[in-house]
Every structure is written in structure tokens, then in C-alpha cells.
Image (cartoon, grey):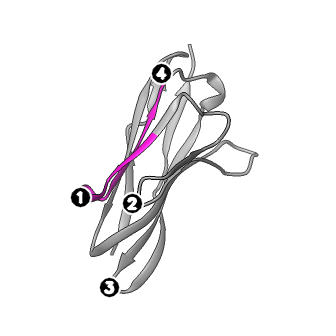
């Protein structure tokens, strides 16, 4: 069974930083694009940042210049460094990845990690 497990969420003051991690486990040959999404109650889930296998990145306009996505292919892990956090960044953050496994391609989601930006 393959899965994505996030960590690193929590409570932080405005202007602070957090680093989220998402590790893939199981019988995985490789991982295609990986991304971070966030959702607040009553709103649709939105893409925060995405990175391809080759390292191409794209970001939501609201986080450009503040958030950085990176990945360690050897560890099957994607990271989201979040700086200059704002209260409007408060959300449940989830990672997503296209995992190539011995059962085929699996579009996998993590369970989510809560980020709260508040003084």
C-alpha cells in the first residue's frame, strides 16, 4: 500500500515560518509531479504550489515570493517552505502526487496537516 504522509503543520504568528514535509511510502518506482493544496471550510481546495520531476515549479499568485516548493527524489519527499505567513494562509494543507507503483499509476493524497496563522 502506498501513501503520502504530511508533517510540519501547526500554529504560527503572522510573519512567521513553517516547513511542511510530505513523504511517500510503499512500493513506489517513481513519482511524477507533486503538489501542495490547501482548503478552508466552505471554500474549494486550491493549488498552492506544484513541482515536476524535473524541478519546474508553479505557484498560486497569493504565495509567490513567500512559499518555496522543493523535492528530494531519493527520499520521495516534497517540501513546502512557508515564510512571511499571513492569517489568510490558515488552512488544511494536503500534498498530492502521481505515484508509479507495481499496481500502476496512483493519484495519491495525504491526510492533510493544519496550519493556523494567528497572533
Can you tell which quarter of the image residue 63 is in? top right
Can you tell which quarter of the image residue 5 is in? bottom left
Measure how far apart labels 3 and 1 are at the Cα level. Answer: 18 Å
Q: Nearer the viewer, mark 4 or mark 1?
A: 1
How dense is the environment of label 3, judged by Cα within 10 Å: few (below 14), some, or many (20 and up)?
Answer: few
Does residue 92 sit above or below 51 in this rendering?
Answer: above
Residue extending farthest right: 42
Residue on which the image places disc 2: 4
Q: Nearer the viewer, mark 4 or mark 3?
A: 3
Residue extending farthest bottom: 103
Measure how far apart labels 4 and 2 are at the Cα level. Answer: 24 Å
Check disc 3 and report its element: helix, strand or loop: loop
First in sequence, mark 2 or 1: give its number. Answer: 2
Measure how far apart labels 4 and 3 are at the Cα level. Answer: 40 Å
Q: Is 13 on the left-hand or right-hand side of 78? A: right
Q: Which residues are magenta?
A: 69-83
Check disc 2 and report its element: helix, strand or loop: strand
Amino acid at each position: 500500500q502506498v501513501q503520502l504522509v504530511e508533517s510540519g503543520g501547526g500554529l504560527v504568528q503572522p510573519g512567521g515560518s513553517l516547513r511542511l514535509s510530505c513523504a511517500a511510502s510503499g512500493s513506489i518506482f517513481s513519482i511524477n509531479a507533486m503538489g501542495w493544496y490547501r482548503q478552508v471550510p466552505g471554500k474549494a481546495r486550491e493549488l498552492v504550489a506544484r513541482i515536476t520531476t524535473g524541478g519546474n515549479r508553479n505557484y498560486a499568485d497569493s504565495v509567490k515570493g513567500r512559499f518555496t516548493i522543493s523535492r528530494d527524489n531519493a527520499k520521495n519527499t516534497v517540501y513546502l517552505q512557508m515564510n512571511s505567513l499571513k492569517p489568510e494562509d490558515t488552512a488544511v494543507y494536503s500534498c498530492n502526487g502521481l505515484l508509479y507503483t507495481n499496481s500502476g499509476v496512483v493519484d495519491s493524497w495525504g491526510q492533510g496537516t493544519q496550519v493556523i496563522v494567528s497572533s
